[in-house]
Image (spheres, rainbow, N blue to C red):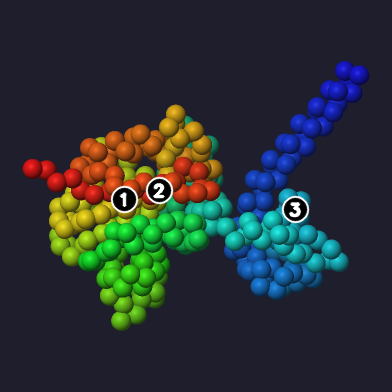
Amino acid sequence: MKNREKRNTDTSSITKTLELLNIGLSCHAYCLLEHTGICKILKDTGEFSEENLGFYQNPALLRSALVTLVGSKFLSFQNKTFRFTDLGLEIYENLGTIFMPIVGYRDLFAKQFKLASNPKDWNHEDIDTVSIANSSVNFGLGKVDQEIFDILQHVNPIGTICDLGCGNGEKLISICDKFGSSGFGIDICKEAFAKIKDSISSKDRIEFIQSDITKLNGIWEDVDVALMNMVFHDIYPSSKAVEFLKSLRSHFPRLRCLLIVDIVTVSDAVSTILPGFDYVHGLQGIVPRSYDEMIETFRQSGYQVIKETKIKNIPNMFIWALSPVCYS
């Protein structure tokens, strides 16, 4: 009896291990199939025939990715045809959540063993900022963006809305369209900045500049509301973050509201984690701030929290609406 129980336990352990392995591999498979356009074909047509693999340069690799998703029950396979399952289609609709760490930080993952012994053995070129910017748009749709709109509706912007770290500019354009506001976007990424120019027309009241937001040189009195979406955690350590927030009061002397959308690490205050967030920043030698550390950083910078929103179904993500404290 004991031997039989042990064999059952061993079988269960192996099954769980293989399931875990398959989930990890499926994330990579999704990203590969999205990159090659096969995911879009599956979404648009409802199926992908195995015979069509012959039109691709590496059919063996792509078939292995498709089969991996069959193993994780994200695809079905029948009559030599692959189709999304309901679960697989739901995952695909949120693919930006997977794409951001797996693709955006793929070069850092590739050198993680070196980084374990030499934490400075990386540079910003190891990060695919364009993929991260594009993924963040998908990540926010239907989740974060609506919360931002609701907060801005209450704030009622009366001047220019500034997006600090605007990426490809899509979020700022969407916000300005909704509220009829002028916009001002700043981002350091050359590639993302190049794509911005294709996103706006001459009638848009939106200006973009390429710059490091921590090294701004200018005063913009028309900025009424500023937004930082998934950017603040990269300003590290906290002493640098405090100085940065203080500097915004000089650059934007009429700033009424600063919205910070960000994620915190696990702590007693917030005991969950967002998968991948701590990992990709650990690869850069960054320890993300906890909830309490985030609030303390705001306080030290001279801001008060006027509204806090916990994003549903996304662990550890918050939106803080901050107002500069007026000192007498």
Q: Earlier in the sequence, mark 2 or mark 3?
A: 3
Q: Nearer the viewer, residue 319 or 77?
A: 319
Q: Residue furthest bottom?
A: 202
Q: How crowded is the residue under tag 2: few (<14 C-alpha within 10 Å), some, or many (20+)?
A: some
Query: Any mark on residue 309, and which?
Result: 2
Quick check: 28 left or right of 195? right
The image quadrant where one finds the C terminus is top left
| Label 3 sits on residue | 73
Q: Earlier in the sequence, mark 3 or mark 1?
A: 3
The image quadrant where one finds the N terminus is top right
* Three-letter code, disc 2: Thr
As drawn, 125 above or below 186: above
Q: Residue at x 60, y 57 (%)?
A: 31
- What's the CA distance linking mark 1 and mark 2? 8 Å
Instruction: Look at the image and tell me whether residue 153 can be seen.
Output: yes
| Label 1 sits on residue | 321
Q: Earlier in the sequence, mark 1 or mark 2?
A: 2
Q: Secondary structure at mark 2?
A: strand
